Image: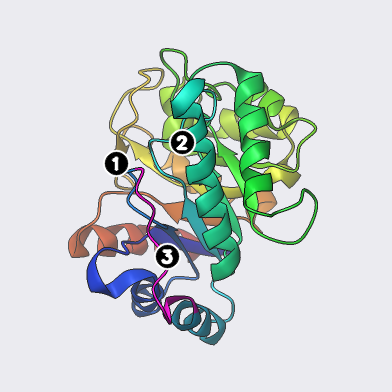
Amino acid sequence: MKYGLHLSIAGKRGIAGAAEEAELLGLSALQIFAKSPRSWKTRPLRPGEVEGFRARQENLGGLPTVIHASYLVNLAAEGELGERSVFSLADDLAKAQALGASYVVVHPGSGELTRARSNALRALSFAGLEPHRRGPRLLIENTAGGGEKLGALMEELAELVADTPFGVCLDTCHAFAAGYDPLRALDELERYVGLERLGVVHLNDSVGDRGSHVDHHANLLEGKMGSKLKEVFLKPRLREKIFILETPRSPQEDAHNLRVLRGWLRGE
């Protein structure tokens, strides 16, 4: 089983620094942004950054890496927003290819489902990644719902990825906020989408109540789902998946969340 945290690449430490932090924390996977998640500005990879990251990856036995796309991306949008979203996602996909990342995770956005799927395919093409060829796999993440957001329901998530090379990312907090019990979300994902398309699980507790449509992550055992997440984490059918914690970060919070996770693995 592979698990890790969403780590920062801010400042001089960069992407290679995130891999170094993953090693210090004893992680077997990690997730990063390849650029600022709240800006359209791209972040070129610095000289030596790719080599440094990939060398540390190799030293850690591969270290599965997930890149999360910008929060600004709305693949379902029309006009300039839609075009910016396509190019931003293509930039992340190209960086993921250079860095040897396994997956790129993106929120589908708000608008027409067919446009979201079409724009995701365009981003794949612009990044030079042909469908069904080796390279990072694009995962569409379920959402907390509310408004016109796509992907809150598992049936809709299935429709988003149907007849495409895309996989899915299951966020437990989003599923809970959309009205699902964590285990029911997993069952319905298997029923409508298929677990073969599931690449990554964002294992997050929820500050908000079930069905609240509030996307506010909590530390493990400190939110409204509590020990139910243990059942998700230890499901035998998810043993080969990557689990990423997007929980609040501080040295104390990291220590708490990793202690809980490792305790579950030990049967505590």
99 shown above or below 210: below
Which residue is rendered at x = 45% and y = 82% of the image? 52
Q: Does the magenta run of residues contain 44? A: yes
Magenta stretch, residue numbers: 40-50
Task: Choose between 210 and 6: the one closer to the eye.
Answer: 6
Q: Nearer the viewer, mark 3 or mark 1?
A: 1
What's under tag 1, amino acid-wise? Ala
Which residue is rendered at x = 41% and y = 12% of the image? 147
Instruction: Assign the C terminus to one quadrant of the image.
Output: bottom left
Q: CA distance from mark 2 to mark 3?
A: 40 Å
The percent coordinates of residue 60 (x first, y second) are 52, 82
The residue that disc 3 covers is 262
Q: Say which element carries label 3.
A: helix
The percent coordinates of residue 263 (x first, y second) are 41, 63
The residue that disc 2 covers is 84
The percent coordinates of residue 90 (x first, y second) are 56, 48
105 shown above or below 58: above
The percent coordinates of residue 39 (x first, y second) are 31, 43
Q: Is residue 268 visible?
A: no
Q: Residue furthest front?
A: 80
Q: CA distance from mark 3 to mark 1?
A: 18 Å
Q: Nearer the viewer, mark 2 or mark 3?
A: 2
Whichever of labels 2 and 1 marks the residue nearer the N terminus, that label is: 2
What's under tag 2, amino acid-wise? Arg
The residue that disc 1 covers is 218
Judge left or right: residue 116 versus residue 83.
right
Task: Choose between 67 and 42: the one closer to the eye.
Answer: 42
